[in-house]
Image (cartoon, rainbow, N blue to C red):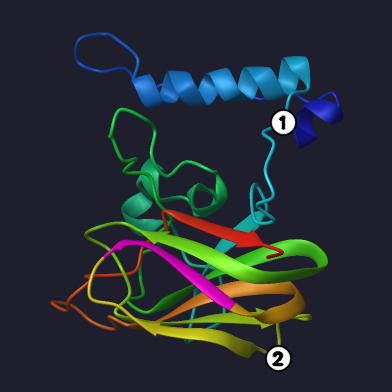
């Protein structure tokens, strides 16, 4: 939408199955893009994180990490694209996950200070943190933990906390922090933020 608003052009490569058919979830995604770009119809949602800028960040160098294995299905924006379950019980295998670092942070920029008091996090069943913090910041330098959780499985978790005002939000994975640990490596299927 940002590119279209500025008279730019975006081309999108579609993956083709061995049968020659397009993947159903890609057709669904392109249908949403068409509605937004051509018709100006945006999804109605109170999710403050939807379509915001997300990054895969290193704990050790505080620099952006590359996508895990350069796989198209692990880009950062998949963590805020609104796609968790694509229907018919088929869970999307597209989720945010970097390479080069076991413990890492999913960093979200809300563009300006925003009030919220609830987060919904969805982790893939095979890639989840067993110990993580949800942190907020106004400047991306000084961070405050608003929720700490320890998990034993992937899935969807709702975190509630006293109302905060912040521009930046990060999901900081503390564990797993090496190979052969439960959770393998944190992946983010979706991060949602709500005012209440």
Res. 48 visible in picture: yes
Residue bearing mark 2: 142
Q: Residues within 10 Å of mark 1 (few under 14, many from 20)?
A: few
Could you say which quadrant of the image residue 97 lies in?
bottom left
Res. 15 visible in picture: no
Q: Residue furthest top?
A: 20
Residue bearing mark 1: 42
Query: From the viewer's perspective, is residue 184 above or below residue 40?
Result: below
Look at the image and give the residue range highlighted in magenta.
Answer: 154-160
Alpha carbon distance from label 1 to label 2: 34 Å
Can residue 114 be found in the magenta stretch?
no
Locate the C terminus and report the quarter of the image it occupies: bottom right
Q: Is residue 114 left or right of residue 177?
A: right
Image label count = 2
Kindly identify the residue that appears in the image at 76 percent across and 16 percent down: 39
Kindly identify the residue that appears in the image at 55 percent across and 50 percent down: 77
Query: The residue tagged with tag 1: helix, strand or loop?
Result: loop
Which secondary structure is most common in the magenta stretch?
A: strand
Residues tagged 1 and 2 counted as in contact (Cβ below 8 A): no
Query: The residue tagged with tag 2: helix, strand or loop?
Result: loop
Q: Is residue 101 left or right of residue 135?
A: left
Coordinates of residue 174 in the picture (x, y in percent): 38, 85
Coordinates of residue 86 in the picture (x, y in percent): 39, 33
């Amino acid at each position: 939408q940002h590119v279209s608003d500025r008279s730019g052009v975006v081309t999108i490569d579609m993956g083709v199955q061995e049968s020659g058919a397009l993947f159903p979830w890609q057709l669904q995604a392109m249908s949403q893009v068409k509605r937004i770009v051509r018709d100006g119809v945006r999804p109605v949602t109170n999710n403050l994180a939807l379509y915001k800028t997300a990054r895969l960040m290193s704990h050790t160098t505080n620099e952006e990490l590359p996508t895990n294995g350069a796989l198209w299905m692990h880009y950062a924006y998949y963590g805020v694209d609104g796609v968790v379950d694509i229907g018919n019980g088929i869970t999307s295998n597209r989720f945010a996950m970097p390479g080069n670092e076991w413990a890492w942070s999913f960093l979200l920029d809300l563009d300006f200070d925003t009030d919220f008091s609830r987060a919904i996090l969805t982790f893939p069943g095979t890639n989840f943190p067993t110990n993580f913090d949800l942190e907020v910041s106004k400047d991306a330098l000084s961070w405050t933990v608003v929720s700490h959780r320890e998990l034993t499985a992937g899935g969807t978790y709702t975190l509630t906390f006293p109302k905060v005002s912040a521009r930046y939000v990060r999901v900081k994975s503390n564990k797993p922090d090496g190979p052969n640990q439960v959770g393998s490596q944190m992946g983010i299927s979706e991060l949602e933020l709500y005012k209440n």
